[in-house]
Image (cartoon, rainbow, N blue to C red):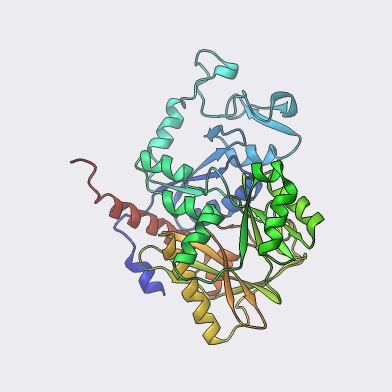
Amino acid sequence: MTDKIRAEQNSYQKPLRIGVVFGGRSSEHEVSLASASNVIDALKRAGYQVSPIGIAPSGRWLIGGDPMKLLSDNAGSSVTTYRGENSPTTIDAQAHGNFNQLDLDAGLDPHAEGRGENWSLLPSTKHASQLADIDLIFPVLHGPYGEDGTIQGLLEMANLPYVGCGVASSALAMDKVLAKQLFAAAGLTQVKYVVVMRNRYRADPEESCRVVEEALRYPLFVKPANLGSSVGVTKARNRDELHTAITIAAQYDRKILVEEAVPSCREIEVSVLGNDEPVASIPGEIIPGHEFYDYAAKYLDDSSQLLIPAQLSAEQVTRVQEMAVAAFHAIDGTGLARIDFLMDNQSGIFYLNEINTMPGFTRISMYPKLWEASGISYPELVDRLVQLALARYEDHQQNSTSH
């Protein structure tokens, strides 16, 4: 396992300066803060210099000062905004539209013309220098505008190496429907599903439910196609609950995925690490503290159990690891991903549920825990991810950009 990963390392020498980007315009904003805090600590322990870069829910980038503290404080009913690194001012968030038109950047030039809503977006000389010194970006962003190829495209345009999957693989993995089509082409077993479009449902809710019921049997799981962390996911046992579930999911995406539940279900997860020759961790199993592994069970309480390793036979371990690597190859993944499976405990069949290209890195997250149980500590894991990112960048630089 370790030899394959080391073979994909590169010639860069530490100490490198790594920009850790966190927060973002997503309902998973708070999860990103928790993940990034751990990643920053691990990178420092691994010997890297770290420049924290926050993104507010409005989309404003925070450079310099303490973006983590700023965004963490903003999670309450008021926001703290900096006019300078050491002079925070508390402002009512509701009165100002949740950060909009506020000077949130510690790095903004205080001498720029047109203060207030027309503040210059150019960082001061000091913070521009900080950005120029960054060798690599570690985007610890979950969900839309971070895990879906958007920031990856920005970094590609800037010719900056970054941790994780590229533009196409990130976008494909984020869209559960497109990912399912790729997995089907790769011959990977999945549950039966139906796609419901938000506008079509709103135009004729009963017809949309009828189409679902003709194809699938209750109970059903309903989820937004482009979101993670179980946000907007609901279980439906009848038509009334199906209406409610679709309405909830439609708050987050125009495309809604309705899946048939797996009987006698066990939730198995595998972490994948690598570029061209990825390797799979030992599998883990989640025993949800709630009816299913929802947002609260993942991040807000410790009621769920993580069983590492999962109680599987040697044959089952090999099978699910092979499926995980095959799923990673199907999206042309690089760096990392967590692959989630549903297992029918009676038949022993594994159903590929979804792939997450920037899984949680919180203290109770499965991705780092699986690698720790597989022999790779948290600091070593983030070091491997940095090395893989640089190796991918060096390989990408071989592509000609002129003709």
- For image coordinates 38% across by 68% down, the residue present is 5
Give x and y (percent) for residue 96: 70, 24
Q: Residue furthest right?
A: 240
The quadrant the N terminus occupies is bottom left
- For image coordinates 41% across by 68% down, the residue present is 278
Is any atom of residue 299 visible in this view?
no
176 vs 307, left or right, is left
Residue 142 higher or lower than 356, as above or below: above
The quadrant the C terminus occupies is top left
Q: Nearer the viewer, residue 125 or 57?
A: 57
Residue 366 higher or lower than 227, as above or below: below
Residue 202 higher or lower than 330, as above or below: above
- For image coordinates 69% across by 62% down, the residue present is 214
Give x and y (percent) for residue 139: 49, 48
330 vs 237, left or right, is left
Give x and y (percent) for residue 190: 57, 68
Give x and y (percent) for residue 227: 61, 50
Is any atom of residue 169 visible in this view?
yes
**Image quadrant in which you'd find residue 288:** bottom right
392 vs 294, left or right, is left
Q: Nearer the viewer, residue 13 or 203?
A: 203
Q: Residue furthest top?
A: 113
Residue 143 higher or lower than 359, as above or below: above
241 vs 73, left or right, is right
